[in-house]
Image (tube, rainbow, N blue to C red):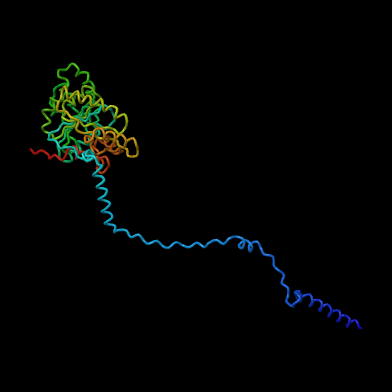
Amino acid sequence: MSDGEDLVSRARSIFARLRDDERPEAPPTNGTGTPEIEPTPATEDEVAPAALPAEPVPVPPPPEAPVVEPPLPEQLVEDAEEIQAELADVRPAAAAEEQAPLPSRPLPRVIAVANQKGGVGKTTTAVNLGAALAELGYRVLVVDLDPQGNASTGLGVNPRNVDVSIYDVLMNNTPVEDAIEPTAVRNLFVVPATIDLAGAEIELVPAFSRELKLRRALDEATGDFDFTLIDCPPSLGLLTVNGLAAAGEVLVPIQCEYYALEGLGQLLKNVSLVQTNLNPRLELSAIVLTMYDARTRLAEQVAKEVRDHFGTTVCRSIVPRTVRLSEAPSFGQPVIVFDSSSRGALAYRELAKEVSGGTPQRTG
């Protein structure tokens, strides 16, 4: 055999072995000619479902029948009737009286704005309430009985340029008409005070009928005015007693804080003493809540306590704490002139309507 034939035979034998390796091996038979199938081991995932009990398939609940509500207007009417019926059973009669406005009183009226506690808004109330009453068409006279003279400057009157003041009326028997000064607000007038009034407390001590000096002076002039507001000093001295003896009513501003409540009891005792000994017609006509800050819980508590104790005497109108009320005196103007749309101006306008009670202006 030549070398070429030897190479060919060797190549054929190699290809034959390669074909035998690629051909699949016949499966063994079980003697019947049927190939014997070797069992395949089951995996863990396939065994687990067979070992565990079959879980029941959840059946969705049947859909609920829609609830048919009555028409909205009828439902609202029924609710409103139920609420009104409940309120009619539990609402006390006093609650309805608390919302009643202050009764109207005959003119002229003389009102003392008093509270021996300082910084509660006496002067602010006297000035702005007077201006709001004048805006309603009433003729108003503000008597500045405080030696500090803040009501005078708040109405644009410079005490240094005043020739006749309330001091001259009390101590020198000067007619009050000579001390009346006009203001920038129509129908609003003021009897100014100067620093001389600070000595009147001592000078009045030996004077005859010292507690009635102001009443006698105002009796000659109050007939020309619908409202006379007396701005009393923050004390319980002779000047305040003169103011209470000359007035027919007392209006008490109360700051919505604890200290303002402390002095109220002593003021009411003094009012009672003046009623008994000097002025039987004097009465506590109104309490005004001032410097109210709705952001504090204390203000709400003070307002509630005052209303619970004094009832309808407390005015419904509340004066808020605002910057405009503090800025207005520096310009010598009431707040209704300085900023007529501010919250303070609106509050004093409402207070003026409440205090006046809608009493018609006098004619002639």
Q: Quadrant of residue 66?
A: bottom left
Horizontally, residue 305 falls left or right of residue 140, namely right
- How far across and how far down the image is residue 136, in percent? 17, 41
The residue under the point 11% across, 33% down is 224
Q: Quadrant of the N terminus?
A: bottom right
Horizontally, residue 270 falls left or right of residue 6, namely left
Horizontally, residue 297 falls left or right of residue 169, namely right
Up/down of 92 relative to 212, above or below: below
- How far across and how far down the image is residue 55, in percent? 55, 61
- Could one spot residue 348 in this view of the protein? no
Horizontally, residue 33 falls left or right of residue 56, namely right
Q: Residue furthest right?
A: 1
The residue under the point 81% across, 79% down is 16
Number of residue marks = 0
Q: Quadrant of residue 195?
A: top left
Looking at the image, which is closer to me, 194 or 234?
234
